[in-house]
């Protein structure tokens, strides 16, 4: 895996750059020196390459470039194949900047000079001084406004060694965002894709007016399917339209964000939850407008949610406020986690150990003195994980018992949040 370090004096915008590139925006970025404390690592994606980014920003204690910082930075940058040296040319170069440049030259790694806070072409005049550092063309960017990042990454790639083997295609996670009108879907979409690295793509061959939006986050590519249906506000037959549209979007996705308004739950939520359940795809319940729920209503809201969404009680919930950017990271992180588990495979030996222990621990259904016996279990499909259980009498398996088993499987076999299917096979 490629590894690239970000180096530079406090307050030049290293954290903003790091956050932009790995795709998070919830980390602390403040406009005064010394906010971040440690070196951080994050994963990012460029041209289908996963790159580990190391932000050494936290190692600086003040404006001084000292021996202690230098040692820690060298340690943190171990294995990095290139360095982004970030400067704020509008401030002019300081003595510390020249010392860092000298140190980088001695380290011998390729250095790309990044001129940050270049928000408009008229700032270009500040770039001249950076030439003097002797690392070639500086790359102008604005981490805050997400400008120039692709050019920067192209430059970085030039300095990274070629991969020996073919880079496997990194499959995107395709997500649908469903929910009643006005629950905040457009607002969440904006919060998620607030960067010029998100691409709105017209997808040929799909519904004529469907629009897919793509972006990278934490080294993973995401596609939100059919955002046209989210942005457009139908004014007639609103609920039916939303249901139809949701169904189409779900069919094209791997995972579902079901958005509900924390302050206003209706029957519609139940219908959408059923659609989601029937699809067998993982669902994340996004409880939006969380900022509007008063403290003394939190318990009642949770109870309402449990009631309305009992069908998909296994689905994880994230609490968001689209207008405050709150919980957006959780939506994405949870999606990555579920997607991976949804595709996972559990070894047969482990499943049968589990089945054996479970049958010893728990009474099985029993009809007219005859007991259900489960002999053997194996995973027959992934996405969703589907298990075949061989037993003496499939007709002894009640819905309640099956639900019970599904819950145990999720809990015991690390499949929390994942829809699991069971197939019963009789064996004499
Ligand atoms: P959509 O129909 O589901 O796409 O909903 P919109 O994104 O258009 O949002 C409907 C209204 O709710 C707008 O006025 C938003 O500003 C507001 N809104 C969306 N998310 C939040 C939130 O988290 N908190 C609050 N207080 N208002 C929100």
Image (cartoon, rainbow, N blue to C red):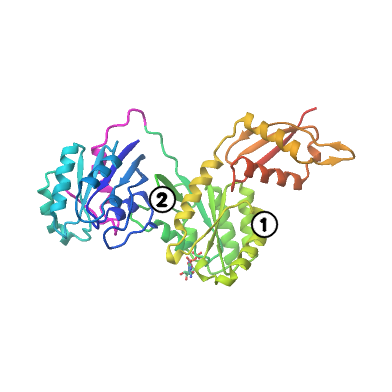
SS of the residue at dot 2? strand
Say left or right for 401 vs 90: right
**Rendered residue at 23%/56% (across/down):** 62
Select label 2 or label 1 by which is in front: 1
**Rendered residue at 44%/66% (across/down):** 323
- Classed neighbour count for the residue bearing mark 1: other residues with Cα under 10 Å, few (<14), some (14–19), many (≥20): some
**Which quadrant does the N terminus fall into?**
top left
Say left or right for 36 vs 181: left
Say left or right for 149 vs 386: left
The front one of 144 and 53 is 53
Q: Residue furthest right?
A: 368
Say left or right for 261 vs 51: right
- Classed neighbour count for the residue bearing mark 2: other residues with Cα under 10 Å, few (<14), some (14–19), many (≥20): some
302 up-or-down from 73: above or below: below
175 up-or-down from 352: above or below: below
Is residue 325 highlighted in magenta?
no
The answer to whether the beta carbon of the residue marked 2 is less than 8 Å from any atom of ligand 1 is no
In x, y percent, where is residue 117? 22, 58
**Which quadrant does the C terminus fall into?**
top right
Residue named by callout 2: 214
Q: Which mark is residue 310?
A: 1
In x, y percent, where is residue 381? 61, 35
SS of the residue at dot 1? helix
**Rendered residue at 41%/36% (across/down):** 169
* Principal secondary structure, stretch drawn in magenta: loop
The answer for how far apart the CA atoms under marks 2 and 1 are is 32 Å
The magenta region covers: 137-166
The answer to whether the beta carbon of the residue marked 1 is less than 8 Å from any atom of ligand 1 is no
């Amino acid at each position: 895996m490629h590894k690239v370090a970000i180096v530079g004096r406090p307050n030049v915008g290293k954290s903003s750059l790091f956050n932009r590139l790995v795709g998070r925006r919830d980390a602390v970025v403040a406009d005064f020196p010394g906010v971040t404390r440690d070196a951080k690592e994050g994963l990012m994606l460029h041209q289908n390459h996963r790159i580990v980014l190391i932000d050494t920003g936290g190692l600086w204690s003040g404006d001084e470039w000292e021996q202690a910082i230098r040692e820690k930075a060298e340690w943190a940058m171990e294995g990095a194949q290139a360095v982004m040296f970030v400067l704020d040319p509008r401030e002019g170069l300081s003595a510390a900047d020249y010392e860092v440049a000298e140190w980088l030259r001695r380290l011998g790694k390729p250095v790309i000079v990044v001129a940050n806070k270049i928000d408009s072409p008229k700032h270009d005049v500040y770039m001249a001084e950076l030439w003097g550092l002797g690392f070639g063309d500086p790359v102008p960017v604005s981490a805050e406004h997400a400008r120039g990042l692709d050019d920067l990454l192209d430059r970085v790639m030039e300095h990274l060694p070629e991969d020996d083997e073919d880079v496997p295609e990194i499959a995107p996670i395709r997500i649908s965002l469903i929910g009643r009108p006005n629950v905040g879907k457009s607002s969440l979409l904006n919060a998620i894709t607030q960067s010029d690295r998100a691409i709105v793509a017209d997808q040929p061959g799909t519904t004529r007016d469907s629009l897919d939006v793509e972006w990278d986050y934490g080294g993973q590519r995401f596609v939100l399917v059919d955002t046209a249906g989210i942005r457009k506000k139908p004014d007639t037959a609103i609920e039916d339209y939303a249901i139809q549209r949701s169904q189409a979007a779900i069919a094209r996705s791997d995972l579902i964000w079901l958005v509900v308004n924390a302050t206003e739950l209706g029957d519609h939520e139940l219908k959408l939850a059923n659609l989601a359940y029937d699809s067998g795809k993982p669902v994340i319940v996004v409880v939006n407008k969380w900022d509007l729920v008063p403290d003394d209503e939190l318990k009642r809201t949770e109870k309402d949610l449990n009631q309305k969404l009992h069908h998909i009680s296994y689905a994880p919930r994230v609490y968001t406020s689209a207008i405050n950017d709150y919980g957006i990271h959780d939506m994405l992180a949870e999606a990555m986690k579920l997607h991976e588990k949804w595709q996972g495979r559990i070894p047969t030996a482990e499943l049968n150990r589990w089945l054996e222990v479970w049958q010893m621990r728990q009474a099985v259904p029993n009809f007219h003195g005859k007991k259900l016996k489960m002999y053997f279990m194996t995973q027959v499909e992934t996405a969703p994980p589907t298990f075949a259980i061989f037993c003496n009498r499939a007709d002894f398996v009640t819905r309640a018992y099956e639900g019970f088993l599904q819950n145990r499987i999720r809990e015991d076999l690390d499949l929390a949040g994942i829809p699991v299917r069971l197939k019963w096979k009789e064996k004499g």
